[in-house]
Image (cartoon, rainbow, N blue to C red):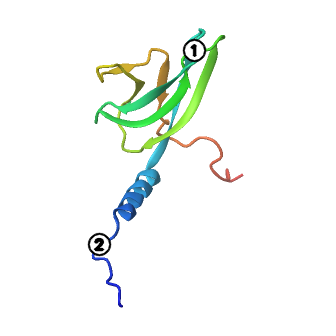
């Protein structure tokens, strides 16, 4: 008995291609801040929001508080098409609440820095 060829590609292939396309056009941003001091033991998911598109483009999970001051700097990949970025949580009503102690730093655009080749000396 001869098997028929599928008329269309499985959905998974399209999803994988979309994921690949998204990852290939990503940029690194840095989440920086100083975590709150306290005795809380839970962790909180902070969402990185593209404010122009009102879309979640990344996330980090951090302790709610620590017993002593602790600075964080975490690199996160987000779509390179992302606009103005904010970081925060969502309240029970689904409203975005920007963090008062975390910020998102996009890479500096402009002249390259660091090793850029021979100097011609």
| Structural crowding at the residue carrying mark 2, measured as other residues with C-alpha within 10 Å and reported as few (<14), some (14–19) or many (≥20) | few
Q: Position of residue 86 (x, y in %)?
A: 39, 26
Looking at the image, residue 70 lies above or below residue 105: above
Q: Secondary structure at mark 2?
A: loop
Q: Nearer the viewer, residue 111 or 75?
A: 75
**Disc 1 to disc 2: CB gap under 8 Å:** no
Residue occupying the point 46% across, 26% down: 46
Residue occupying the point 33% across, 19% down: 92
Q: Residue furthest top?
A: 38
| Structural crowding at the residue carrying mark 1, measured as other residues with C-alpha within 10 Å and reported as few (<14), some (14–19) or many (≥20) | some
Residue occupying the point 65% across, 11% down: 67
Q: CA distance from mark 1 to mark 2?
A: 51 Å
Q: Position of residue 69 (x, y in %)?
A: 64, 12
Q: Circle 1 sits on which residue?
A: 65
Please identify the quadrant where the N terminus is shown: bottom left
Q: Position of residue 96 (x, y in %)?
A: 33, 23
Residue occupying the point 54% across, 17% down: 64
Q: Residue furthest front?
A: 1
Q: Circle 2 sits on which residue?
A: 8
Residue 100 is tagged as none
Q: Nearer the viewer, residue 114 or 77?
A: 77
Q: Is residue 63 left or right of residue 25?
A: right
């Amino acid at each position: 008995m001869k098997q028929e060829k599928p008329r269309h590609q499985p959905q998974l292939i399209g999803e994988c291609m979309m994921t690949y396309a998204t990852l290939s056009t990503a940029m690194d941003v840095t989440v920086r801040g100083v975590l709150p001091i306290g005795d809380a033991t839970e962790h909180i998911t902070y969402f990185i929001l593209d404010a122009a598109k009102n879309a979640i483009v990344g996330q980090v999970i951090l302790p709610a508080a620590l017993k002593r001051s602790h600075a964080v700097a975490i690199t996160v990949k987000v779509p390179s098409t992302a606009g103005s970025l904010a970081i925060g949580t969502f309240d029970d009503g689904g409203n975005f609440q920007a963090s008062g102690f975390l910020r998102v730093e996009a890479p500096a655009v402009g002249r390259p820095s660091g090793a850029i080749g021979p100097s011609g000396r």
